[in-house]
Image (cartoon, helix red, strand yellow):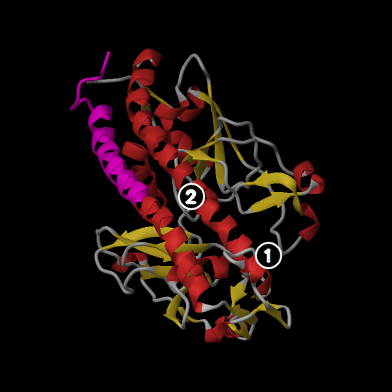
Amino acid sequence: MSWPTYALDELGMVSRGRSRHRPRDAEHLYGGPFPFIQTGDVKAAPMYLKSFSQTYSEAGLAQSRMWPRGTLCITIAANIAETCILDIDACFPDSIIGFVADPGMANTKFVKYQFDAIMREQMRRVSQGAAQDNLSQAKLLSFRFPMPDLPTQERIAGVLSTYDDLIENNRRRIALLEQAARLLYGEWFVHFRFPGYETAKFVDGLPEGWRKCSVDQLLVLQRGFDLPISKRKEGSVPIYGSTGIVGYHNQPKVVAPVITTGRSGSLGQVSYSHDDCWPLNTALWVKELKDIPPLYAFFFLQNLDLKKFGGGASVPTLDRKVIHRLDAVLPAPKILEQFEIAVGPMFQQVKNFEVQNDKLTKVRDLLLPRLMDGRLPIPE
């Protein structure tokens, strides 16, 4: 099978993002209503991106550019040739290139699948060697993309996106289950509307049997472990960084269940792993629980809003000793037990959906290169 080849700018409009300042140099540009996408957001996104870690103000938008929903985002620094499709209108910096397909030439999903199957590794090879891997726009445009006619592109993209759609549906179900458990935590432990609250006695503002304490009397946080990319080996053990899963390895460092949160760089995201995993040194993990179950600890840390405790000038850093000294409340053992019974089945469903997604991802990734290089017939 031989398809004609095209440079990316022959398939649509290509342009670098725009951002003249870093957050620490111009704080007035940030914190408004306009999504500002960064390379880490692109890497963490599935097919479509709708979550983001930063926003622009009106002033920020004025010195940037708003890209439309449906734009293919391509990272050219830090995480090379990672891609996603915007599911929202958003701005992004010059470390990301935007591609808007010519509807008569290219299917955006097909172009993304080309990156995933063929182009990403080629681009990473030519971008290596500097202090920080970098792929210029000129280098990106020097690559030629094998492209069949548009109907064939759409058929291939349709087969592959069936798997991505199922994966996305499962992600939405996971989010709904976690939200339901989070709301239950708020009702019971923030608003004190736990089972039997109507007849509960309160002493010094707390239900009888509850007591004031510090965080280190509930749990102990520990810094994660170094694992450079050069030492990672192919495997299925998740590696957790400051924003969640950032890769995989062949052996775990910590036994499940594992709760992690960002220690350096990105703060505030708390992750729960059903599987043995490897927390990186950019994360903190819960080394020890004291009289509280894991799921309560997970929502307790989420409710702390850890972002506001980040110190450091250029790179926010979370000091576990500061967190350990914070005031906390230890609920009555019976209420903690009831909470675990209530949310445990929800998280079992979450685990089931994660297992389904892992299988769907493996099947899609087997099909992807075979459809692109002709080893599998293209469906009519």
Magenta stretch: includes residue 375: yes
Q: Quick one: 4 or 371, which is closer to the camera?
A: 371
Residue span colored magenta: 352-380
Q: Residue at x 31, y 72 (%)?
A: 255
Residue 239's label in the rendered image is: none
Main secondary structure along the magenta-highlighted residues: helix
From where the camera sits, is residue 38 visible? yes
Precedes in sequence: disc 2 or disc 1: 2
Quarter of the figure that contains the C terminus: top left
Specify whether 234 is left or right of 148.
left
Magenta stretch: includes residue 31: no
Q: Residue at x 42, y 34 (%)?
A: 112
* Location of residue 51 with respect to 235 vertically, above or below: above
Q: Residue at x 36, y 55 (%)?
A: 348
Q: Quadrant of the rendered structure where residue 266 is?
A: bottom right
Q: What residue type is labelled 2?
A: Leu
Which of discs 2 and 1 lies nearer the camera? The answer is 1
Residue tagged 2: 177
Specify whether 355 is left or right of 286.
left
Residue 113: image location, x then y, percent: 37, 33
Residue 107: image location, x then y, percent: 45, 22
Q: What residue type is labelled 1?
A: His
Residue 228: image location, x then y, percent: 37, 69
Q: Mark 2 Cα within 10 Å, few/some/many (few <14, many 20+)?
A: some
Count all numbered tags in the image, as a single digit.
2
Specify whether 185 is left or right of 151.
right
How far apart in space, not on screen, are marks 2 and 1 (Cα)? 20 Å
Residue tagged 1: 191
Q: Which residue is drawn at 46% across and 59% down?
A: 343
From where the camera sits, is residue 40 visible? no
Q: Mark 1 Cα within 10 Å, few/some/many (few <14, many 20+)?
A: few
